[in-house]
Amino acid sequence: METIISNYLPSAEAAKMQNDSTGLIRRLKRATERRAGNEYTVFVQEWNDTWLILRKTGLFLRPSTNGKLVHTLRHYQNGTDNVYGELLPKFISLILKQDVKMMSDQIFVDLGSGVGNCVLQAALEVGCESWGCEMMDNACDLAELQEKGIQRSKADVVLVNNQAFTPNLNEDLTNLFLDLKEGAKIVSLKSFVPHGHKITSKNLSAACNRLEVVQKTYFSACVSWTETAGTYYVSTKDSSKVQAFAEKNM
């Protein structure tokens, strides 16, 4: 709770909760020391109500990076598969609430999670199990993702900021998605299905045939690299089209 207050609440709200006399943290500790269960329950409800208001108003703060670790981020090379920019809290909330309707009993995976902002936001905002995988230099590569079983995960939602990914990496990721369960959703900045793609006898085994894609639009203050609107894609793992085509053309 103290970590959330320090890193995610607006300064005015954080100051109230951190007040040594009247702050919520202090009141919770006093209730615990006195074994005052009823008071403790009231204070927890106050916390939940405050957090709910902040969620609805979109007043999440982006946590600051630990100064001792900033130098490690310099190892990223701009314009490569590993770097492009951030999806901002407002955008992540839109994705979680409207696009995929994330539930607390589901699993969220961010491929290319950076310092973990999206992973932490999903866990805090939805209460779901949330995982991130970052492809840092000398840390891991696609083969290591396979070893860890990411492609076979039980993820309900996979987030991929592939805005600057190479075609080869996007194709490799599409193959990983074959092992996602039916109905799993993939949110990406570029589509994993080529525009105008159709299933044929020659490409029947292509991984992208098992994805149903919907194009959507994001607006200002959604990504770190531009203030203008852009497109993103929500894909659903759906093998029924491939099965139907195979049965029809057998």
Image (spheres, rainbow, N blue to C red):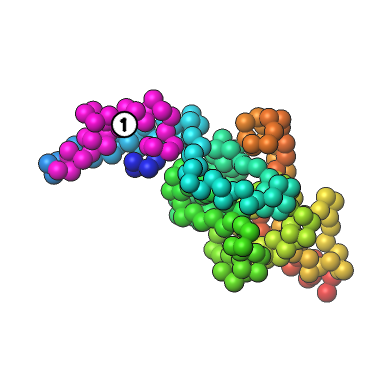
- Residue drawn at x 56%, y 51% as measured from the top left: 72
From this viewpoint, is residue 2 visible?
Answer: yes
Magenta stretch, main secondary structure, is helix
From the image, which quarter does the N terminus lie in? Answer: top left
15 relative to 127 in the view: left or right: left
**Of the pair 206 and 137, the residue shown nearer to us:** 137
Which contiguous range is marked in magenta?
5-33
53 relative to 209 in the view: left or right: left
Decide whether residue 19 is among the magenta residues. Answer: yes
Q: Is 59 rendered above or below residue 118?
A: above
Decide whether residue 177 is among the magenta residues. Answer: no
- Residue 165 pos. (x, y %): 73, 52
- Residue 61 pos. (x, y %): 49, 34
Mark 1 residue element: helix
From this viewpoint, is residue 56 visible?
Answer: no
- Residue drawn at x 62%, y 42% as measured from the top left: 86
**Of the pair 209 and 92, the residue shown nearer to us:** 92
- Residue 234 pos. (x, y %): 67, 48
From the image, which quarter does the C terminus lie in? Answer: bottom right
- The total of numbered circles placed on residues is 1
- Residue drawn at x 84%, y 66% as measured from the top left: 203
- Residue drawn at x 62%, y 48% as measured from the top left: 74
- Name which residue type carries label 1: Met
- Residue 56 pos. (x, y %): 47, 32
In the rendered image, the residue lying farthest to the bottom is: 250
In the rendered image, the residue lying farthest to the top is: 12
**Of the pair 212 and 34, the residue shown nearer to us:** 34
**Of the pair 202 and 123, the residue shown nearer to us:** 123
To which residue does mark 1 refer? 17
